[in-house]
């Protein structure tokens, strides 16, 4: 019985831990790379965000975009926003997009 319980707990940790770490990395990456313009809450109400008239990442218009669309904008840049392809890995960009989903 102990072996079965140990196996179940181990399996649960292996499934849950990567998702938890990805979310934490996404939040840290967002804070380091995005928050200066988009704001910690995604509102875009920073001096830079206001001057660039950034859209609120929490808004329905942004949140209704697919992960692929948000990934493309993050990777390739848009307008004055720099491209992060080559600066962040695909996994890191996915983690940032996942974090942006939590801002709604």
Image (tube, rainbow, N blue to C red):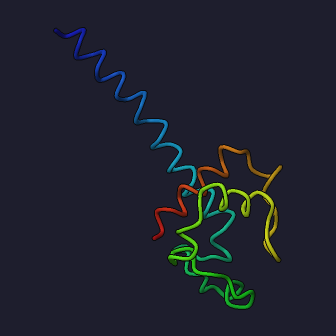
> Which residue is depicted at the point 46% across and 63% down?
102
Does residue 103 appear left or right of residue 53 in this picture? left
Q: Residue 69's spot in the image, x, y percent?
A: 67, 61
The mark total stands at 0
Quadrant assignment, res 30: bottom right
Residue shown at 59% from the left, 86% from the top? 45
Relative to 100, residue 15 above or below: above
Question: In the figure, 64 relative to 61: above or below?
Answer: above
Left/right placement of residue 21 relative to residue 51 reads: left
Is residue 98 or residue 35 the one in the foreground? Answer: 98
Q: Quadrant of the C terminus?
A: bottom left
What residue is drawn where x is 74% and y is 50%? 88
Residue 78: % across, % down: 79, 71
**45 versus 25 height, above or below:** below
Depth check, front residue: 40 or 95: 95
Q: In the displayed structure, does residue 53 sit left or right of residue 25?
A: right
Does residue 62 lie above or below 53 as drawn? Answer: above
Residue 71: percent from the left, percent from the top?
68, 56
Q: Quadrant of residue 57?
A: bottom right
């Amino acid at each position: 019985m102990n072996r079965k319980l140990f196996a179940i707990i181990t399996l649960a940790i292996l499934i849950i831990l990567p998702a938890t770490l990805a979310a934490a990395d996404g939040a840290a990456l967002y804070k380091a790379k995005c928050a200066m313009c988009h704001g910690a809450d995604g509102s875009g109400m920073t001096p830079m965000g206001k001057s660039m008239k950034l859209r609120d990442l929490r808004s329905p218009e942004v949140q209704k975009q697919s992960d692929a669309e948000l990934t493309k904008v993050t990777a390739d840049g848009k307008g004055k926003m720099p491209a992060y392809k080559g600066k962040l890995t695909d996994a890191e960009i996915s983690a940032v997009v996942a974090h942006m989903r939590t801002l709604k």
